[in-house]
Image (cartoon, rainbow, N blue to C red):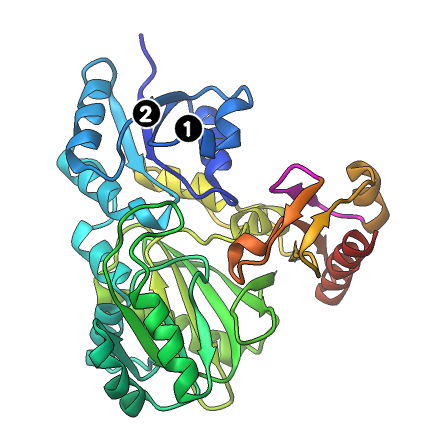
């Protein structure tokens, strides 16, 4: 009897894509990977047991044709993706075949940051003041409405691409104009024209990871220097008071309820200060930034496996341990040639790391993008003491950068 299939439509490139393939095989399913560019994914060529189907994944008709081809020869148990860009088409295909998954209409609402903010605001949920910018004529009104400093960002984006703090009117005009002039994403796909100007919220940044309406963790986020918003590390569980954690969890759950996102994973980003919690955005997917790996090492809970089990209609369990984990990303200090000539196993022993991973083959020519593409690898440290875990991860990154 042929194995049942789990279909993946594209993937993120520096996060959980390979892990999804591995966990799927462990669950006794055949991963079937649909992609327009197989060469983009190194894990497809590393001996993994995966069936690759090349097709135009930006075309509903092309994806439907391939899905139906697979369905003709083996049962399909689930359809999903770990890429923001393909959440909607994956949800549509799952709905078409009567499979479990998020509501496509909710995915579309969440992916449009302007519509999402309006929906949350309508339910009385604290979000930044914002204004959608569809044409250059909208820019003066947006600045007048939101004020400065503010954050300019794509209307539908990912990985901090194009997100920038603007402090002057000229900065805002240039940033928003640049976003309006962007017609394709970093994969070369055509995107909707538009930008969003949001008031800048001061406070510590966190994310809440949710699956099927159930909170599975709260993560503290660390960002690089302004005016950009590159995430350079995460700590989990976030070391905060019970009172603040309750506020953060309550706000995140209210947000997904207001958006109607009751099924599937959610990654809710927010900022908190002494006065209130403000929702920055809700992403209708599993967290990126290797947060799933951080969870697995620190808590014994594997969010990737949990998402798959949820889609299969099976219980996905709870964390089994209570250690603290810190991930820190390797971001070169200078553009140009970057290398780390040391033995990876020796590095892990030296700093007692749980994980050390590079996203590129070294040496590499590094050119700064001021978004997630600046991260060329990461380290994870785990300890019963949260301060010790963070210090070891940070020390390892410093060593790598200056080796």
Would residue 194 be found to the left or right of residue 387 on screen?
left
Q: Residue 131 at x, y = what percent?
A: 26, 80
Residue drawn 46% across and 86% down?
A: 167
- The residue labelled by disc 2 is 54
Quadrant containing the N terminus is top left
- The residue labelled by disc 1 is 38
User: Was residue 111 drawn as part of the magenta stretch in this picture?
Assistant: no
Q: Which residues are magenta?
A: 352-362
Q: Nearer the viewer, residue 221 or 382?
A: 221
Q: Is residue 123 above or below residue 108?
A: below
Q: Earlier in the sequence, mark 1 or mark 2?
A: 1
Count of numbered labels shown in the rendering:
2
Q: CA distance from mark 1 to mark 2?
A: 7 Å
Residue drawn 25% across and 40% down?
A: 58
Q: Is residue 235 above or below residue 201?
A: above
Residue drawn 32% across and 56% down?
A: 284
Q: Residue 213 at x, y = what percent?
A: 32, 58
Q: Main secondary structure of the magenta part?
A: loop
User: Was residue 361 drawn as part of the magenta stretch in this picture?
Assistant: yes
Picture quadrant where residue 325 is located: bottom right
Picture quadrant where residue 312 is located: top left
Mark 1 neighbour density, 10 Å: few (under 14) some (14–19) many (20 or more): some
Residues tagged 1 and 2 counted as in contact (Cβ below 8 A): yes
């Amino acid at each position: 009897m042929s194995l049942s299939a789990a279909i993946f439509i594209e993937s993120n490139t520096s996060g959980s894509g390979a892990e999804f393939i591995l966990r799927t095989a462990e669950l006794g399913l055949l991963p079937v990977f649909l992609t327009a560019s197989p060469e983009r994914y190194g894990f497809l060529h590393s001996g993994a047991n995966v069936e690759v189907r090349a097709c135009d994944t930006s075309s509903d008709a092309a994806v439907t044709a391939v899905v139906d081809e697979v369905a003709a020869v083996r049962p399909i148990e689930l359809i999903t993706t770990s890429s923001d860009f393909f959440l909607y088409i994956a949800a549509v295909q799952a709905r078409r075949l009567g499979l479990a998954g998020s509501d496509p209409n909710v995915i579309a609402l969440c992916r449009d940051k302007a519509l999402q903010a309006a929906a949350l605001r309508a339910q009385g949920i604290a979000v930044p003041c914002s204004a959608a910018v569809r044409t250059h004529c909208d820019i003066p009104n947006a600045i007048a409405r939101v004020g400065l400093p503010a954050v300019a960002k794509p209307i539908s984006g990912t990985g901090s691409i194009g997100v920038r703090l603007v402090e002057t009117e000229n900065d805002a005009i240039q940033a928003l104009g640049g976003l309006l002039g962007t017609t394709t994403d970093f994969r070369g796909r055509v995107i909707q024209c538009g930008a969003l100007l949001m008031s800048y919220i001061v406070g510590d940044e966190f994310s809440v990871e949710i699956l099927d309406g159930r909170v599975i963790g709260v993560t503290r986020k660390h960002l690089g220097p302004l005016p950009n918003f590159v995430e350079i590390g995460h700590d989990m569980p976030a070391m905060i008071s019970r009172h603040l954690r309750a506020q953060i969890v309550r706000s995140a759950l209210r947000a997904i309820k207001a958006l109607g996102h009751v099924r599937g994973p959610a990654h809710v980003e927010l900022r908190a200060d002494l006065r209130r919690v403000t929702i920055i955005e809700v992403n209708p997917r599993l967290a990126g930034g290797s947060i799933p790996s951080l969870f697995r090492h620190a808590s014994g809970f594997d969010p990737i496996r949990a998402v798959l089990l949820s889609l299969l209609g099976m219980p996905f369990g709870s964390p089994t341990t209570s250690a603290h984990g810190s991930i820190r990303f390797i971001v070169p200090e200078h553009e140009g040639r970057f290398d780390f000539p040391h033995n990876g196993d020796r590095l892990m022993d030296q700093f007692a790391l749980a994980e050390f991973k590079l996203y590129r083959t070294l040496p590499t020519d590094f050119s700064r993008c001021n978004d997630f593409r600046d991260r060329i690898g990461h380290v994870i440290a785990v300890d019963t003491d949260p301060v010790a875990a963070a210090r070891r991860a940070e020390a390892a990154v410093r060593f790598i950068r200056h080796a």
